[in-house]
Image: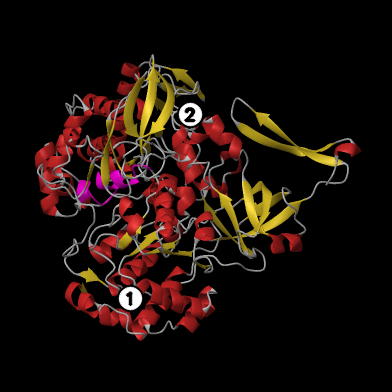
Amino acid sequence: MEKISTICPYCGCGCGLYLHVEDNNIVGVSPLRHHPVNKGSLCVKGWNSFEFVQHPERLRYPMVKENGAFKKTSWDEVISLVAGRFSEIKEKYGPDSIALLSSAKCTNEENFVLMKFARAVLGTNNIDHCARL
Amino acid sequence: MAGLASAFGSGAMTNSIDEIDNARVLFVIGSNTTEQHPMIGMHMLDAVDKGATLIVADPRQTQIAKFAHIHLRQKSGTDVALLNGIMNVIISEGLVDINFVKRRTENFDEFEKIVSGYSPEVAEKITGVPADEIKRVARLYATEKRAMLFYSMGITQHVTGVDNVRSCANLVMLTAHIGQPMTGLNPLRGQNNVQGACDMGALPEVYSGYQKVSDAKARRKFENAWGRKLPAKPGLTLTEMFDGALNGKIRAMFVMGENPIVSDPGATHIREAVKKLDFLVVQDIFMSDTAELADVVLPAVSFAEKEGTFTNTERRVQKLRKAIRPMYGAMPDWKIIAELSKKMGYDMGYRATHEIMEEAALLTPSYGGILHHRLDDFGLQWPCPDTNHTGTPFLHRKKFTKGLGTFNPIDFVPPAESADDEYPFILTTGRIYFRYHTATMCGRTSTLKREEPECFVEINHKDAAKLGIRNNNKVRVSSRRGEIVVNALVTDKTPEGIVFIPFHFREAAVNLITNTAVDPVAKIPEFKVCAVKIVPLLPKPGMRQTVLYDKKNDIKILLDLYEESEAEYEG
């Protein structure tokens, strides 16, 4: 069994925890003993923070809605479709007709990249996330 | 954050979490810390064990309030009056740190004029907190050297959210409780990376590091780095985006890992807005209510399957490590966006997340020394301007980020909605220990789900008696915007005239009824105050309510009252 040191995904405390991994499966959690925030403790959410990761309801493939129902598609196709539609809408209604919601659940890197995508590629400052909620 | 920025120049927790243990006075206002930030709550209780005095201001008797030496139960939405009352006592009893006020702040005279109108007696009338208690708290807080003030969504989710925050800032400046270890003003941020999302510029008016898009110099820097012309006009905030979608200004949206239909106020309004869009893309790990309405759904990976960094509420940037390979056909969010960008003719060229952080560090002064390889031992706290810097445990040591700290004179403004004859209760919303946000994650964790499987409304036992409501009765809670049916939880945790509903449950989404009024500056919705009425749905004798559980969609459906045998009926 391997122990991977990482950060709890729930609240703003940012507790350090180990994910216990066996054959690409997460089988358990334990707290980091000397972490300055949680000092060897975890709350009920932290102790159970891995259960949802390998939940069978996880989205498995990109999907496109056709006639009201979702249809499976490939990454190549879906990227072309989204890029095409965004370009079209930007062309027709201007860059400020597109808005982006980033996420306080995503990493710094992901937020930075989405912010760059909004501003440099789409050309709009319409980007926000749920900080206010 | 807008409130703190106007007072100090930057919005973040000024201290570190492990400083809490050695503080002498902890003043917690509008934060249910032991339930919302359990590990910070643990540090607070450690401090209490070491002899610190704990003061909690909250209308509800939350778990942390039960541990408090003094519990102020102000009326919902009267925080400004309470804080002004406390500051009035500090000024009139000569407890102001005059040296600090003269040397490091400005605009004191203007501020004093306003506060002089809030004697403890006036504050008592508005807040319902006895004048003697206000005096006691003022003396305790002002005379102790190591005093920390904490606040959270109970302060910010009001139409006066920014005013509330500025009042907190006034209080710490008045008593010089800032710029030292174990002494400061500490907003506790909710989501694991809400601090980081703000720091990285996922906001309409700033780039990373709070550099303004309207500032030509900052814009030029980013234009040079990215090789594209950038727009100068600040963009729309989340609430404005949905208004824009309704009136046709916004035609397309890209949503990364959020579920605004459950988390945002006026859910019906948002659902309509989303339906009006020409094109909606949602990127998430599960099929959320928002994703159901999308044209395209992209499967992303969870925290365990990717690398990157999170910034916690004490500004600590920490490394996330990949534990398992991505599930099924999912891709990390950054890769999806980079692919999309490439297809649209702009190749970002990142090979791994540490390269993104290198670029962010170059463009963001406070993250200048934050590179992945430096984060191995419990991360670094920003500001960390260069690669020799070891991080900053507490802020504003010698001067504030903006130079002098500014006192903001603030008058009490009542909440957007108040109780009246038709809607006699004030509804406040929040979180509970076993649940998290819209429950996309914890709703799929059996251990957490079994603890609080159903939504409830907390109501005071006196109010319940008046309405003939008994514990676990079904009640209908309605506001001017909508209604939901939930179980009543009769308690003395919530004072008379106030009811509380957690917002985690999609089957009883409280945001169907919350007020969409927002703070004029920060655009935070007023989740904490909304007028409602409550009608008990009493089971008829010999009848019983049945709840059907739709397993596939994870929804509980309340069926009409069904006939039951008499023996089983005990109501």
- Residue B19 coordinates in the image, percent (x, y): 30, 55
Q: Is residue B215 shown left or right of residue B154?
A: left
Q: Is residue B566 shown left or right of residue B288?
A: right
Q: Mark 1 lies on which chain?
A: B
Nearer to us in this view, B234 or B3: B3
Residue B409, numbered circle: 1
Q: Are marks 1 and 2 in contact (CB under 8 Å)?
A: no
Identify the element where label 1 is drawn. loop
Residue B285, numbered circle: none
Q: What residue type is labelled 2?
A: Met
- Residue B191 coordinates in the image, percent (x, y): 39, 44
Where the N terminus of chain B falls, by quadrant?
bottom left
Residue B76 among those drawn in magenta = no
For this orientation, the residue located farthest to the top is A23
Nearer to us in this view, A19 or A127: A19
Q: Do labels 1 and 2 share a chain?
A: yes
The residue where tag 2 is placed is B287
- Residue B507 coordinates in the image, percent (x, y): 60, 39
Q: Is residue B178 above or below residue B506?
A: below
Which one is closest to the eye, mark 1 or mark 2? 1
Where residue B118 sits, quadrant-wise, is bottom left
Where residue B339 sits, quadrant-wise, is top left
Residue at 16% from the left image edge and 66% from the top image edge: B403
Residue B199 among those drawn in magenta = yes
Q: What stretch is highlighted in magenta?
A: B192-209
| Mark 1 or mark 2: whose residue is earlier in sequence | 2
Separation of residues labelled 1 and 2 (CA atoms): 47 Å
- Residue B285 coordinates in the image, percent (x, y): 42, 28
Q: What residue type is labelled 1?
A: Pro
Where residue B500 sits, quadrant-wise, is bottom right
Residue at 19% from the left image edge and 34% from the top image edge: B372
